[in-house]
Image: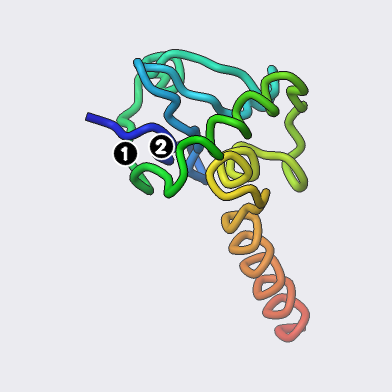
């Protein structure tokens, strides 16, 4: 059984799509075309396997407060400032961050450095 606030992941082509479990089979995520929304587990999975990246949250009341706040002022998707990972971390911890963006940024810098150095 999933705990409320669990971070869920679904593999996509080059990243993991993230969502936060709300309970009773519902997930809040940030979709590139529709923004922050609540969907069923099946809709979130999109035919792929869901894994639990992080189980539950320390304070369910704080998590649910942030869920209500997010749903009353749903934001649109922005790859760099408000992607699915930003949304899930904001809900779970109160801080919007995206470690995957940092990793891809570092990979990009290393690739650019290697390319410039090889010339």
Give the answer, above or below, for where 111 lies relative to 87. Answer: below
Along the line of sight, which residue is nearer the eye, 89 or 57? 57
Residue 76 screen position, x and y as percent: 77, 26
Kindly give the residue lying farthest to the front in the view shown: 61
Along the line of sight, which residue is nearer the eye, 77 or 73? 73
What residue appears at the point 61 percent right and 19 percent down from the top-left corner? 37
Give the answer, above or below, for where 97 lies relative to 7. Answer: below
Residue 93 screen position, x and y as percent: 57, 50
Q: Which mark, residue 51? A: 1
Badge 1: residue crowd in 10 Å (few <14, some 14–19, many ≥20): some
SS of the residue under disc 1: strand
Give the answer, above or below, for where 19 lies relative to 39. Answer: below
Badge 2: residue crowd in 10 Å (few <14, some 14–19, many ≥20): many
What residue appears at the point 73 percent right and 31 percent down from the top-left corner? 77
Q: Are marks 1 and 2 in contact (CB under 8 Å)?
A: yes
- Say how the picture is coloured: rainbow
What residue appears at the point 74 percent right and 86 percent down from the top-left corner? 117
Say which label, 1 or 2, has the lower sequence index: 2
Along the line of sight, which residue is nearer the eye, 64 or 12? 64
- 49 left or right of 22 in image: left
Along the line of sight, which residue is nearer the eye, 93 or 98? 93
| Residue named by callout 2 | 8
Residue 106 screen position, x and y as percent: 65, 69
What residue appears at the point 58 percent right and 46 percent down from the top-left corner? 89
Q: CA distance from mark 1 to mark 2?
A: 6 Å
Q: Which mark, residue 39? A: none
């Amino acid at each position: 059984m999933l705990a409320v606030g669990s971070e869920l992941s679904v593999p996509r082509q080059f990243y993991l799509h993230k969502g936060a479990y709300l309970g009773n089979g519902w997930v809040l995520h940030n979709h590139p075309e529709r923004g922050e929304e609540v969907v069923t587990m099946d809709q979130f999975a999109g035919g792929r396997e869901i894994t639990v990246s992080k189980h539950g949250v320390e304070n369910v009341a704080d998590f649910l407060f942030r869920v209500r706040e997010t749903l009353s002022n749903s934001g649109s998707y922005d790859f760099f400032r408000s992607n699915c990972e930003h949304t899930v971390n904001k809900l779970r911890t109160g801080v919007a961050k995206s470690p995957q963006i940092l990793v891809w940024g570092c990979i990009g810098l290393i690739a650019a450095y290697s390319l410039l150095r090889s010339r």
